[in-house]
Structure formats: structure tokens, C-alpha cells
Image: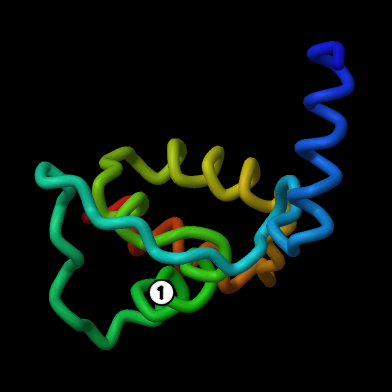
Amino acid sequence: MTPYVRVVVAVALAIALGGGVSGCAPAAEPAAPENAAPAPAPTDDPGAALVEQKCSMCHGTDRVWAKSQDAAGWAKTIERMKSNGLVLGAEEEQAIIDYLGSR
């Protein structure tokens, strides 16, 4: 069997077994790395609630809390996530950018 055929067979099996290939499929939450930033304390900020709600749809929020960037950096990250399927209203997007950019 050629390497190409092996890859095709592996992908077909993954799809058939429900693993899929990519996208926002629910997955087991990986253990947070030892040096990961802890999640922030609960807050009444609507941006924090939106981060928990929207970002956790596709990946763990430990990724978000471990990253530090300014509002412009978060705006770029959100645009990238939107190209991956994230759906946000303009007000939701701004609330997330404001919250994460101020941390």
C-alpha cells in the first residue's frame, strides 16, 4: 500500500468513526500545561462571559488565558477565529476585545 493510500484510508476511518478531520467538533478537554495562566476570577464583565461562552465552543479557554496581547492583537485573533466559524455580533466582538485587551 502506498503512503498516499494509507493516508486516505486513515482519513476515511477517522471520518467513519466520528473523529472528523477538522472544525469545531467537541473534544475532550486537554490537561492544562503546568505553566498555563490560571483562569481569571469570575467577574460581571460581559466580555468575560462571552469569552467563556464563545471561545470554549471550539477549544479550551486555557489558550485564551495563557495569551497576552493588546486590543489590536485580540482583534486579529478574533478575525482568524471568525474565519474558522466563530459567529459574533459587532457588540459581542467589541466586548471581548475590550475585556481581553485590558487584562
Residue 94 position within the rendered picture, expressed as x and y whole percent measured from the top left? 52, 63
Quadrant the N terminus occupies: top right
Residue occupying image coordinates x 40% and y 61%: 60
* Tag 1 secondary structure: helix
Quadrant the C terminus occupies: bottom left
20 to the left or right of 99: right
35 to the left or right of 67: left
Residue 48 position within the rendered picture, expressed as x and y whole percent measured from the top left? 34, 74
Q: Quadrant of residue 19?
A: bottom right
* Rendered position, 101 above or below 89: above
Count the marks: 1
Q: Quadrant of residue 86?
A: bottom right
81 to the left or right of 72: right
Residue on which disc 1 sits: 52
Residue 54 position within the rendered picture, expressed as x and y whole percent measured from the top left? 54, 71
In-front residue for pair 27/95: 27
Looking at this rendering, what residue extends furthest in the bottom direction? 44
Residue occupying image coordinates x 45% and y 56%: 97
